[in-house]
Amino acid sequence: MDFIFIEDMRVEAHVGIYDRERAAPQTLDLSLTFGVPDEAAQDDDIAKTIDYAVVITRIRSELAARHFNLLETLGEYLIGLLLDEFRAPWVKISIAKVGIAKGVKRVGVQIERERI
């Protein structure tokens, strides 16, 4: 299996349970790795792989329109998008809130799933 990765994608998202988190969007760092069919490289055909530009646009659009209480829920949602809509066979995602606590650079989750 071949993989595509998107690292350190900065996005604005409405996520959190505290009033200060609900008041305004927060900056998140997202990193994704997802499986793609091997034949894309063999045929040099974008139609046989997952277009990372489309994935990035779709993620930004979804995060602009939704609120999630938990990073875990946000992660599962994005993984479901990649598994179901983009037909990725395997996805690993890391999501971190930036500067959320004094003296802490990032707080986040990492989730890995595969299509059954």
Image (cartoon, helix red, strand yellow):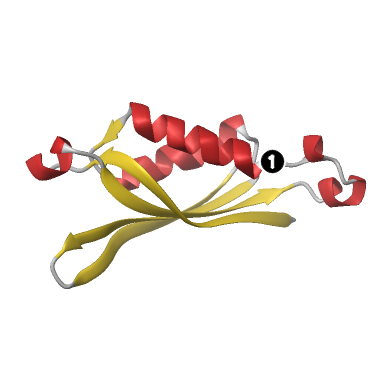
Does residue 111 show up?
yes
Residue with the mark numbered 1? 50
Quarter of the view holding residue 94: bottom left
Amino acid carrying label 1: it is Ile
The x, y position of residue 80, in whole percent, is: 50, 37
Q: Quadrant of the N terminus?
A: bottom right
Indicate whether 80 appears above or below 72. Answer: above
Counting every numbered tag in the picture gives 1
**3 on left or right of 11:** right
Residue 116 in view (yes/no): no
Specify few, some or many for label 1: CA neighbours under 10 Å numbering under 14, 14-19, or 20 or more: many
Q: Residue furthest left?
A: 19
Front-most of residues 24 and 112: 24
Q: Residue 95: x, y in percent?
A: 38, 54
Residue 14 in which image quadrant:
top left
Using residue 14 as the reference point, say whether residue 54 is left or right of it.
right
- Give the residue displayed 42% in from the left and 31% down from the top: 62
Q: Quadrant of residue 4?
A: bottom right
Q: Position of residue 3 (x, y in %)?
A: 68, 56
